[in-house]
Amino acid sequence: MNKRRILYKAIAILLIIASLGGLASCTPQLKPSPEASNEDEEKEPPKELEELKKSIEDIEKALMSMHEEKKRAKQGIISSQSGGGQGQQGQQQGQGGQQGQQSQQQGQQQGSMGQEQIQIQMKPEELAEYQKQQEKAKLQEELAKKDKETLEKFESLKKDVLGLHEKWNSFEPKAVVALAPQKSMEDFENALNNLTDTIQSKDEYINLLSVNSLYKTLPDFYELYKTKEPPDLDRLRYGIKKVKLVAEKDDYNSMKPALEYLINVWSVAKPKLKKSSSELMNKFEFALNDLKKSIEDKNKTIIDAKSEVLLKIIDEMVQSLKK
């Protein structure tokens, strides 16, 4: 760790000296306007940082989509893209006689004539059991198909995570020149390494926690530049998503420090927001209090709902700050 700190300091000193040397070699009469223009450009977040953030967002979206689809599959709900109808069939299970026969005929239009004859010869209770087994087999087939698709998606995500390392290494020298806190750089790199390890597990939930942890440190780098929105908004997103995720596992021990972090960041962020956002700030304040109460009550449904409300308000704040 000490060697890495020495390396950061050495790189920073060399790059600063090189920059000063370049300025000294130029006469002040030559390019006054471009110099001023360059100073303005340097205040903007570099493209390397923007590309890094965009890639993190893409990975998070892919993982969230997979996570939600997995939860639906576990509930026995087949998406409409798969040719579905499973939810309705599930409601019709156990209804023997003519209703069961009609449901089976509708769901098995491509079945052979022999199967239809077998169904006709069955007693109502036998037909209901047969229908149940057919639906179970179909669900297992769908789950196997989804598992295969998930494996393929994870292979693609592994490449995307490796791409994050490349983008991080492209931004890293600029972070050093901009005098980024060494701890922030180390924390981000540790979080990135952790994501690289967890992506091997092919667990959507664990990887969502890992990719979300990148948002805890990423705002530190945006604070080095001129931005249209306070970097604290991304810190708020991190805290809200952390609460939302750990609530799924009823992990209230992890939820309390996440809530405390969220409240502290909000107190820092409020003075940085425009007065024109006062209405949204009030909405956020009330929703945050509701979230706090739902955590105290250990009401997972309300925690999820209030988390979504808070994330939506942040998006509205971002839009209002662009005006």
Image (cartoon, rainbow, N blue to C red):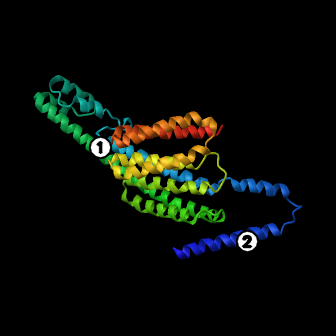
Q: Nearer the viewer, residue 231 or 270?
A: 270
Return the x and y of residue 216 as percentages of the image width and height. Answer: 50, 54
Residue for badge 2? 17
Front residue of 40 and 53: 40
Determine whether the residue tagged by mark 2 lies in a helix, strand or loop.
helix
What residue is rendered at 53% in x and 53% in y?
55
How many C-alpha atoms fall within 10 Å of the one at disc 1: few (<14), some, or many (≥20)? few
Q: How far across and how far down the image is residue 47, in percent?
A: 64, 55
Q: Amino acid at mark 2?
A: Ile
Q: Looking at the rendered structure, which numbered label has been put on residue 34?
A: none
- Rendered view: 87 above or below 184: above
Q: Which residue does the image show at 80% across and 66% down from the upper left?
A: 23
- Looking at the rendered image, the quarter that the C terminus falls into is top right
**Label 1 vs label 2: CA separation?**
59 Å
Position in image of residue 205 (x %, y %)? 38, 51
Of the residues shown, which amino acid type is indicated by label 1? Answer: Lys
Q: Which residue is mark 1?
A: 74
Q: Residue at x 37, y 49 (%)?
A: 246
Can the viewer see residue 52? no
Where residue 32 sits in the image (x, y, percent)? 85, 57
Mark 2, residues whose alpha carbon is within 10 Å: few (<14), some, or many (≥20)?
A: few
Q: Is residue 34 above or below residue 103?
A: below
Q: Would residue 258 be found to the left or right of residue 13 on screen?
A: left
